[in-house]
Image: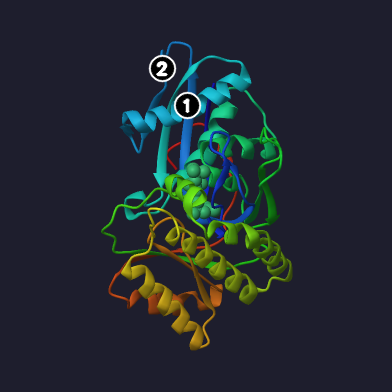
Amino acid sequence: MKATAKAHTNIALIKYWGKRDESLILPMNSSLSVTLDTFYTVTTVEFNEKLTEDVFFLNGEKADHTDTERVSNYLRAIRKFAKKHLFAVVRSENHVPTAAGFASSASGYAALAAAATKAIGLNLHPQELSQFARLGSGSACRSIYGGFVEWQKGVKEDGSDSFAVPILHEDDFPIAVLSVMVATNRKKVLSRAGMKRTVETSPFYQGWLDTVEHDLSELKHALELRDFTLLGEIAERNALKMHATTLGANPPFYYWQSATMEVMEAVQNMRSQGIEAYFTMDAGPNVKVLCLPEDEQKVYDQLKQIPSVKKIFTCHPGPGVTILPTGEADV
Ligand code: DP6
C-alpha cells in the first residue's frame, strides 16, 4: 500500500481566477497552462493499518499542524472513494524554490493525488486523477499532463466534468519560460483568498468573465498554428487582465512589487528591440518570461542586468505526472 509519484509545476497562460464552488474547487472559467520541466515534487504515500492518524513530512521534516491538516483532509476524500479507512505516512520532497516565492501547490497536489490513489489500490484514468488533484488545489489538475494543458471548467454541480485535458505534447511546441525571481519584501495575499475576495467584491471581475473564454479559444488557435507571437500577446494580455481585477477588490490588493514592474518593462523594451519576449505572473511578485528557445540566452542576459532580479531559472515544457518505482523516492 505504498506508491511514489513525481509531478511538475505549471504556469497558466490563461489564468484560473475565481471559484464557483469553494469545497469542490470548481472554477468560474476554463484555463490553460504549460507544465514546466525544472520544478517538481516527489511524494511517497504509505497507508498502514497500525497508524491512528495521518503523518506528513515535508522536505524531510515533520510538517506543522496546518499543513498536516490540509493533507489529511485531502486524504479523507480518497479514503471515502476507495472505501478503505486507513491512515497514511506522506513524504514530500519539493524541488521548487518555495522560499523564493514559487508556488508548489500544483506539483504538490498532483503528486499527492497520484501517489495516494495508487497506494490505496485505485487505478484511475488520468481524467479521474485530474479531478482528484483538483480537489487539493485547482491548478494541480493541469499538472497531471505534460506540455500545454486545458482545464475545462465543466458545468455539472458535482464537478464530474471539471478536469484537465492535454492540448499539445511537451515536444510539439518548444518554447522557453524564464522564471524570474525578484527581491520580495511583502507577504502576499494567497491565491485562494485573493481570488475569493476578487469574485465577491471587484466590479472588474465581470469584465474578466466576459472575455476570458475568448482569450482561451484564441490561445488554442495560436497553439494549433504554433504561432509564438500570438501566444505571447494573448498570455501577457490575459495576465494583466487578471491582475487588474485585484485592484477593484475591496480591500484592494496587488501582487506586483516595483521589481516586478521593472521586469515587465524590460520585456516590453526587448520587444521594441525586436526580441520576442512576453511576461506572465501568478499570485505573487515573480515573473515568468516567455520566449523562443533561440532567444533564451539573449533574454536571460538582459534580465540578469536588472539589479532587483535575484535569480533566473530556465524552464521548458515538461512531462505529466509519473509513478516512480518505490526506492526512487529521493530523486
Ligand atoms: C493565479 O490553484 O493555487 O496561479 O485552487 O485555491 O488552491 P486553489 O488555487 P491555486 O490558484 C492558482 C491561481 C493562479 C492562476 C493559475 O494557475 O491558473
Which residue is found at the position 54% from the left and 32% from the top?
Answer: 115
Which residue is found at the position 64% from the left and 25% from the top?
Answer: 122
Q: Is residue 154 above or below residue 100?
A: above
Which numbered tag is attached to residue 73? 1
From the viewer's side, name the closer residue of 176 and 4: 176
Q: Is residue 72 above or below residue 173?
A: above
Instruction: Quarter of the image for the C terminus: give it.
Output: top left
- The answer to whether marks 1 and 2 mark residues whose Cβ atoms lie closer than 8 Å is no
- Residue 272 at what x, y percent from top left? 49, 87
- Say whether residue 180 is visible: yes
Which residue is found at the position 46% from the left and 36% from the top?
Answer: 329
Name the residue beneath numbered marker 2.
53
Give the amino acid type for the residue marked by disc 2 in the picture.
Answer: Glu
- Residue 175 at what x, y percent from top left? 58, 68
Which secondary structure lies at badge 1?
A: helix
Q: CA distance from mark 1 to mark 2?
A: 11 Å
Which residue is found at the position 37% from the left and 53% from the top?
Answer: 251
Which secondary structure lies at badge 2?
A: loop
- Residue 101 at what x, y percent from top left? 36, 54
Asked if residue 166 lies left or right of residue 194, the reply is right
Q: In the current view of this chain or complex, which residue is farthest to the bottom?
A: 273
Of callouts 1 and 2, which one flags the residue occurring earlier in the amino acid sequence?
2
Please tell me how many numbered marks the rendered image carries: 2
Q: In the current view of this chain or complex, which residue is farthest to the top?
A: 50
